Amino acid sequence: MSEPTLHDVAARAGVSIKTVSNVLRQVDGKVSAATAARVHHAIEELNYRPNLSARRLRTGHSDVIALAVPDLRNPYFAEVAAAMITAARNAGYTLLIEETGGDPAVEMSAAEGLRDPLIEGVIMSPLTLDPRSLAARGRAIPLVLLGERDYAGPCDHVMFDNVEASFRITEHLLEQGYQRIAVIGRQDDPPHATAVKRLKGYQKALRRAGIRYDRSLAPVVSGAPYSKVEGARAAEHLFGDDGHPDAVYCFADVLAIGALRTAHRFGLHAPADFGLAGFDGIEEGRFSIPTLTTIAPDFTDMAELAVTALVERIRAGSAIDHRDIRCRYDLVLGESTQVSLAAEFLAV
Amino acid sequence: MSEPTLHDVAARAGVSIKTVSNVLRQVDGKVSAATAARVHHAIEELNYRPNLSARRLRTGHSDVIALAVPDLRNPYFAEVAAAMITAARNAGYTLLIEETGGDPAVEMSAAEGLRDPLIEGVIMSPLTLDPRSLAARGRAIPLVLLGERDYAGPCDHVMFDNVEASFRITEHLLEQGYQRIAVIGRQDDPPHATAVKRLKGYQKALRRAGIRYDRSLAPVVSGAPYSKVEGARAAEHLFGDDGHPDAVYCFADVLAIGALRTAHRFGLHAPADFGLAGFDGIEEGRFSIPTLTTIAPDFTDMAELAVTALVERIRAGSAIDHRDIRCRYDLVLGESTQVSLAAEFLAV
DNA sequence: GTGAAAGCGCTAACAG
DNA sequence: CTGTTAGCGCTTTCAC
């Protein structure tokens, strides 16, 4: 009662196993149509499926790639994961999802593909991975990082321009007339590249508007990845003080959702009492009250670019120089910064 | 520059490959400590890792199990997936995550383990899978379903008692003094087992309170899985009518979040204007405004039970009768039904 | 077009 | 305790 093998199929179809193998792997022009039909019939009858372990052992490649994210429950990473599953399948690969918990050791291990030696390449959203250890990793498995380049390394990076995107959304806030724009998401301990770049874009927009960057309006957020809890905590400082900001720009939608709750506790509501902007374009922000103004990456585009880049690396045997690949994104306007809309609501 | 093999390690350590193999698989009492140390040293030096394809081919088992869920972006399934990854790893298995999109054909294919023949068992959260096709599936791979038993079948089911949980949360609403309790989540087209049971629990609680079940307060929700969009749509009917319900109980937190948005559009707010309860205990409901009263399953417990059951099935070779396994859950009280709390807020 | 034979890296029997 | 050997199911030369 064990699984049928190539031999069984061959015997049933009255051909050699070579022929069955050819049919299976769609080697065209090698097998007559009639024979192919007979083989297919036999496969059907026996409910045969090739033993992938054997094929992998023989060919030396598994067609498995891994995606390493800090936490699947974080809606941003859930979006990434869902898009990657589809992109990987379209490229003929099976995707294995790993959770790193943001743990440096686990991230390093993922970057080495250690989890399972049959993994041919890794796409990772790094949190703590530092340049030196990346350069020193024991096994140079093809690697694509989700996020902008922080340092030179033998891997590709896929992400939109964070400085530019951050600049755009800050400009939007300024255009809406907000003056005291706080920012939630600054990080110090390990100055995460993404946080640094988003802060840079924010500062650039302020400067252009002739507004001085006020450090007290940029509370440091600890812990990674960004979370609702941290957003709520950071907002305490902002709304607790007198003379609270007239707008809050969060480096992640989850931070914004957390901030919204804190504001609610203080009896403050967006957009009536302050403007609010997020980052990431998660579904939650399209249903929060108010809906969030945010930067929404095109997850499908991101996933396709990452998988394509990884597959190229796998095929080329890591003889590829590091590349920076930009994915599409959009500035999405929600109710959280629609001052005029809010006024309308109040009038009703 | 190919990967080192057992032979390389053996040569380096000056022993036979058998000894290396023994050391690797931690076969105790077979290898002297000194030899083991030498072998470990060689493994370290060569940065050797066993070729899993070869091992799998030889042993016939892959230690890979699959989890099939409709959509990873749905926060409920993200919670499930995250818990499963951990539970699987703790049990020595690698978890492969598949998205079915709720498509019957894809679900069937997942139940057959067709995706990859090396998958040893499947845990699935079924949406459309019907009894007959399940009984007729071509390949009887060990299967554990997340959800209550709808029909007899050669698989285990892991879930808390939906009727009971639904009864409890409805009772809570009644205790809070709500009388006209609408329900969002009824399904007709395929009468999904979960929806049926939750409706049953709701009706039971009403009956006990001497309230007649009013079909017009139970709009049908189409599409699966439950989503925010559907929750918002269903709520239109409820809040659009005059004499809207004084409480809304949703069969999923995402439905409740959607309903909250619609209510907001009608200028209604929970708990001031109506009570609201959800189901699933997702993080989002702990940050929504108001926070949700809900039924929160213990995802860790659920995952451990499911993985344990599946592993037993794999080991026993499907000679196990179908079992119903109950996981823990809690009734979580949020602001959405705290009438007194709401009154306090208003007083301020 | 098809068949025979070798071998991918590992584990498990069996001998020593 | 350690070494030798066979073979898991497949792909891939190489003959025919």
Image (tube, coloured by chain):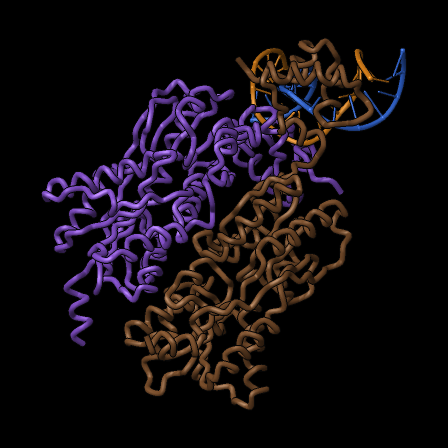
Chain colours: A purple, B brown, C blue, D orange
Q: Of residues A57 and A22, which is closer to you in this image? A: A57
Q: Position of residue B106 (x, y in %)?
A: 52, 52
Q: Of residues A190 and B81, which is closer to you in this image? A: A190
Q: Is residue B334 above or below residue A54?
A: below
User: How many discs appear?
Assistant: 0
Q: Position of residue B217 (x, y in %)?
A: 44, 82
Identify the residue at the far front of this view. A242
Q: Residue at x 65, y 65 (%)?
A: B149
Q: Position of residue B208 (x, y in %)?
A: 59, 86
Q: Residue at x 55, y 90 (%)?
A: B210
Q: Is residue B190 above or below residue B48?
A: below
Please give left or right for residue D3 compared with residue A262 in the image. Answer: right
Q: Residue at x 46, y 50 (%)?
A: A73
Q: Of residues B219 and C8, which is closer to you in this image? A: B219
Please give left or right for residue B81 compared with residue B8 in the image. Answer: left
Please give left or right for residue A94 compared with residue A20 in the image. Answer: left
Q: Of residues B76 and B339, which is closer to you in this image? A: B339
Q: Position of residue B318 (x, y in %)?
A: 74, 50
What quarter of the picture does the C terminus of chain B occupy? Answer: bottom left
Q: Is residue A219 above or below residue A8?
A: below
The reply to whether residue A32 is in sight is yes
Please give left or right for residue A280 compared with residue A273 in the image. Answer: right
Q: Residue at x 66, y 62 (%)?
A: B326
Q: Quadrant of residue B238?
A: bottom left
Q: Quadrant of residue B235?
A: bottom left
The reply to whether residue B140 is in sight is no
